Amino acid sequence: MKKFNKLFPYVPLLFGILYFYCISCSAALYGDDLVYNHNLDGRSILQWCKEFYCNWGGRVPLQLLDIMFLYHSIKYWQIFNTVIMAVNTVYTVKIAKLFNKDLTDKSLFLLTSFQMILFIFMPKSTFNEGAIWITGSFNYLLPCAMLIMGLYPYIANIKEVKISKLEYILSYLSVFLCCYTEQTSAIFICMVIICLLLQFFRKKFVSKGLLALFAFGFLNCVVMFMAPGNKVRYDAELICWYQSFDTYNIFDKIVLGLIHTMKVLMQNGIIYFAILLLFIGFMAYKKDKELMLSYSFLCFLTFVNYHLVYNLTDEIVWQIYSVRTLLTIGMICFWILYSSWFLFYLLKNDMNLAVVSSLLWLATFCAGIVMGMSPTIYASGLRVFFVCYVLLILLDCTIFSYLLNYVK
């Protein structure tokens, strides 16, 4: 009976692992899997790495893992994919738990259940192509899981929670892998810089171990972004997918990424925003009933933005300099920033939670905007938003964990 009580909070996770394994078993080789299936034939691993880095891109470690699994039975990938999905969910819960040290077994059960439900309800168009596809899982699921795992030591540090030596060692592996895709590397670098600055301004020093881990990650980001193959791939994809893309300036590309991100997240992931709005409303009511006026304004802004992006087309960038378009973009940016500020204000009694929550909220949109820098923004489909949804899930779970204090 005692053993069951200890396992009780993790029952949803066990069911989740079984669910992820079952849907991984439904995967079949297609798309880029067939392209990379025999990519190593006649070449050594070292030779392949050199050629890929110079002729196609900087995602060498992830693509190498992909190819190595493609050379073996798909059953090995099914097990590996399940493990990585479990890592993603476990570290989401671990980060959320940092903001409620007094979680009871019942509360932990609710948190793990809530987190699993959010993962299961991720839009299939994103989840299936981002996690239940061999090449896709190595380009989206794996680096995303490694991002959450790599952020854990820094968030634990600002909460003054010590991590084990094993977790610290594993963080090097996670940081190494997450720094070899554009989305996760950008989010990692930006969030970690702010976490380190927060520690510095509070204590006037920065953990040497975490600084070394950041330097390691930053170095790998440089290696990835400086790959000669990135230019080769860009030129090839420009011709194939978006020939007019090269005429856009940096502002056009940011707007392109923002509009595309808002359309996808608002139309397909509205449930995550609705849950967050409910949490914000509950906190506003508990903190000060007068804040409900500001909350009503936030709900109104969300409603307006939902309809604004619903009626926009992805090619809005061609009308970027029209007054109507600029006002629409301004309204969207105002909604994002106002939401971030209101969330920060509600949580300012726990400054660490306020900072992390605001960062996760902003990172959700930044992860999508990054895709505006690539001519494959549409060709890549909806799987590129897997990272955005995971960040939203992490944000919802973190606030849910904090709110469990009110139901003890």
Image (spheres, rainbow, N blue to C red):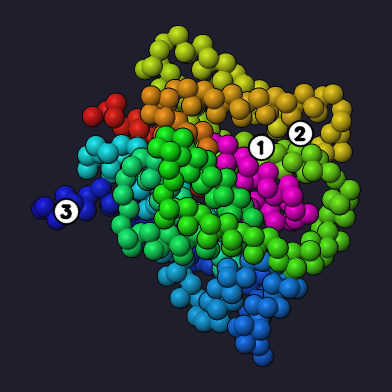
Which span is picked out in magenta? Answer: 361-384
**What residue type is disc 2 on?**
Leu
What numbered label is drawn on residue 177?
A: none
Is label 1 in a helix, a strand or a loop? Answer: helix
Image check: 77 left or right of 181?
A: left
Mark 1 or mark 2: which is in front? 1
Verify CB contact (< 8 Å) between mark 1 and mark 2: yes
Instruction: Give the Cα separation between the discs numbered 3 and 1.
Output: 44 Å
Instruction: Give the Cα separation between the discs numbered 2 and 3.
Output: 52 Å
Q: Is 46 inside the magenta-drawn segment?
A: no
Q: Which residue is mark 2?
A: 312
Q: Which residue is mark 3?
A: 4
- Graded by Cα atoms within 10 Å as few (under 14), some (14 to 19) or many (20 or more), the crowding at tag 3 reads few
Going from N to C along the chain, the mark reached first, 1 or 2, is 1
Specify whether residue 225 is in view. Answer: yes
Please tell me whether the stretch drawn in magenta is mainly helix, strand or loop. Answer: helix
**What residue type is disc 1 on?**
Met
What numbered label is drawn on residue 262?
A: 1
Q: Residue furthest front?
A: 204
Location of residue 199 (image quadrant): top left
Is label 2 in a helix, a strand or a loop? Answer: loop
What residue is at 86 percent from the left and 52 percent from the top?
Answer: 246
